[in-house]
Amino acid sequence: MERRLAHHLALAAEHCPSLHGKRVTMHTIRHTAAMRLLLAGVDVTAIALWLGHEQIATTNIYLHADMTHMQEAIDRTTPLAVKVGRYRPPDSLIAFLEAL
């Protein structure tokens, strides 16, 4: 398997010279595939099954979130048009509450 990978890596390097000198292993390909599936929105349990892992904890080793993925998660939690500042109830509400 490693010999086949080395052969195809050499072929790819002919078209993409930046691959020369890069260390690409089967583990690298598995990690990349797992991350691409995660970024595509595939559930971690499905990724674990695809990788042949019995436990999700093993799969989590492959799934290191990159900064782009983390920023996208933060962007999804941005509040909708909320006015920044402290809430100031109207006088009528304060009067109602005091009358209770």
Image (tube, rainbow, N blue to C red):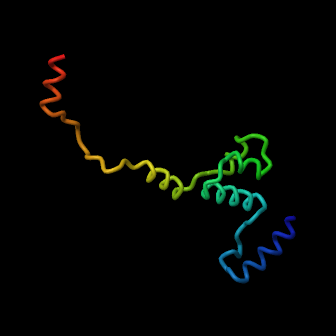
| Residue 92 as seen in the image, left or right of residue 40 | left
Name the residue: 82% across, 69% down. 5
Residue 80 location (% of width, % of height)? 35, 49
Quick one: 47 or 28, which is closer to the camera?
47
Q: Quadrant of the C terminus?
A: top left
Q: Quadrant of residue 10?
A: bottom right
Residue 74 location (% of width, % of height)? 45, 50
Name the residue: 76% across, 57% down. 27
Quick check: 22 above or below 55? below
Residue 19 location (% of width, % of height)? 69, 74
Name the residue: 80% across, 49% down. 52
Name the residue: 71% across, 76% down. 20
Quick check: 7 above or below 60? below
Quick one: 26 or 49, which is closer to the camera?
49
Total numbered labels placed on residues in the image: 0
Q: Quadrant of the N terminus?
A: bottom right
Quick one: 15 or 36, which is closer to the camera?
36
Residue 6 location (% of width, % of height)? 81, 71
Q: Quadrant of residue 94?
A: top left
Quick check: 52 above or below 19? above
| Residue 66 as seen in the image, left or right of residue 58 | left
- Residue farthest along the top direction in this orientation: 100
